[in-house]
Image: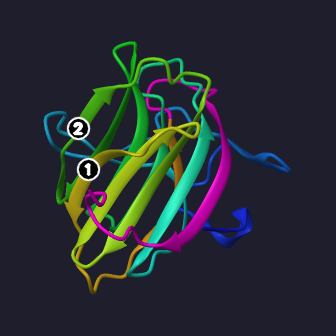
Amino acid sequence: MSEIDWTAGTWTNEPVAVTLADDGMRVTAREGSDAWRTTSYGFVHDTEHALLAPFAQDTAVEVGFRLDLSDQFDQAGVFVRIDETSWTKAGVELSDGVEGLGAVVTRGVSDWSLSPVPGWSGRLVTVRASRSGDALTIRARVDDGPWQLVRVAPLDAGATAWAGPFCCAPSRAGLTVHFTSWRVGPADAGLHPDP
């Protein structure tokens, strides 16, 4: 994997503050920032802070961050965007007091999957989005642990897409996420490991 320079991306929505340092990038989210379309809640939010660069076919993007969430719906991870109605966000979100690893896949309307990740708080989380053929495969891990499959979602092979780190703070001010890495490399060789 090759490092992507933090200055190579473009924000979908400017955060409150961005600080670059040798150990990564710290992003402070705006209160009320979020990405969601319609399902169950009835609203459309396009106010996420996603730093995006081109995401070519047969490549993978990895985003690393320190997990430090404290308020309802605080979230961070990787964002893949085609347009305002077609996008995927994947990472860790605090929901009802529990940190969960999951993804929101949006094709006109959003869906949401989430699974608890006890013991991940304060540790380094890496989320990987791999694009190959007609699929987007999301995996994640904590520290140097094994990769866990999070989601497989459709992604048109011919679509122009962008990807990179994101964070949102739907319910409060003051969330600052410490992103430690943003990398690009070849897409995963397959959906399942060789036996």
Looking at marks 2 and 1 on the same chain, the residue that comes earlier in the sequence is marked by 2
Q: x, y percentage for residue 162?
A: 45, 71
What residue lies at 53% left-to-right and 32% top-to-bottom? 31
Percent across and percent down for residue 168 are 49, 39
Viewport quadrant of the C terminus = bottom left
118 relative to 132, above or below = above
Disc 2 and disc 1 in contact, CB within 8 angstroms: yes
Which residue is situated farthest in the right direction here? 22
Displayed quadrant of residue 188: bottom left
State the SS at label 2: strand
Colour scheme used in the picture? rainbow
Please name the residue shown 59% across and 25% down the image: 68
Q: Which residue is mark 1?
A: 151
Question: Residue 57 location in percent, x, y?
Answer: 38, 81
Residue at point 26% right, 50% down?
151
66 shown above or below 78: above
Can residue 164 be seen in this snapshot?
no
Q: Nearer the viewer, residue 65 or 189?
A: 189
Question: Is residue 108 on the magenta stretch?
Answer: no
At a point 22% along the width and 40% down the height, the residue shown is 112
Q: Disc 2 or disc 1, which is closer to the eye?
A: 1
Left or right: 10 as drawn, with respect to 17: left
In terms of image quadrants, where is residue 175? top right
Residue type at mark 2: give it: Ser
Which residue in the protein does label 2 denote? 113
